[in-house]
Amino acid sequence: MTITVATPAELAGKVGETATGGWLSIDQQRIDAFAHATGDEQWIHVDPERAASGPFGATIAHGYLTLSLIPHLAGGLMAVERLAMAVNYGLDRVRFLRPVTVGSRVRATIEITSAEESRQGWRVGSRTTVEIEGSEQPALVADTIALYVPER
């Protein structure tokens, strides 16, 4: 399901609505690329042999990798027409609740929690939950804010 509005202002009437995206597989190549890009090459992320006997039984995705996937995982869950641009405005709260082991599939569910007009446009708060397939506990929950700038 996609939350669809004709203008950014209509997001105020969508507070409380949710949408869930599709599954994404987390493979070792993605984990390694993130480790290389950030310089966080701890063995629990990049050494499958050592990680197999470690606390998680396999390599795990970085928490910040999972967090950075929110734009991809939530992409397409909100369709806002008559929009000049949308940008990340920030995060209010993030909690990493469960590690994502290599080979897992994750998806995002968003809930619109607020929509307030500002000088720049509409600041829209969302609670994003990144689920792990087959797990009752999510990987993370993040309260995000985006700025939606209407066409002029």
Image (tube, rainbow, N blue to C red):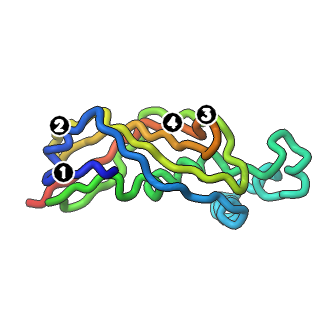
3 or 2: tag closer to the N-terminus:
2
1 or 3: tag closer to the N-terminus:
1
Q: Nearer the viewer, residue 106 or 149?
A: 106
Query: Residue 123 at x, y = what percent?
Result: 25, 42
Query: Residue placed at 47% from the left, 37% from the top?
Result: 142
Decide: few, some or many residues near mark 3? Use Cα within 10 Å; few <14, some 14-19, many ≥20.
Answer: few
On the picture, is 50 further left or further right than 7? right
> Mark 3 sits on what residue?
136
2 or 4: tag closer to the N-terminus:
2
Quarter assignment of residue 39: bottom right
Amino acid type for the residue under numbered disc 4: Val
> Mark 2 sits on what residue?
13
Q: Nearer the viewer, residue 21 or 74?
A: 21
SS at mark 1 in the image: strand
On the picture, is 79 further left or further right than 56? left
> Mark 1 sits on what residue?
5
SS at mark 4 in the image: strand
Label 1 to label 4, Cα distance in Å? 25 Å
Q: Are marks 2 and 1 in contact (CB under 8 Å)?
A: yes
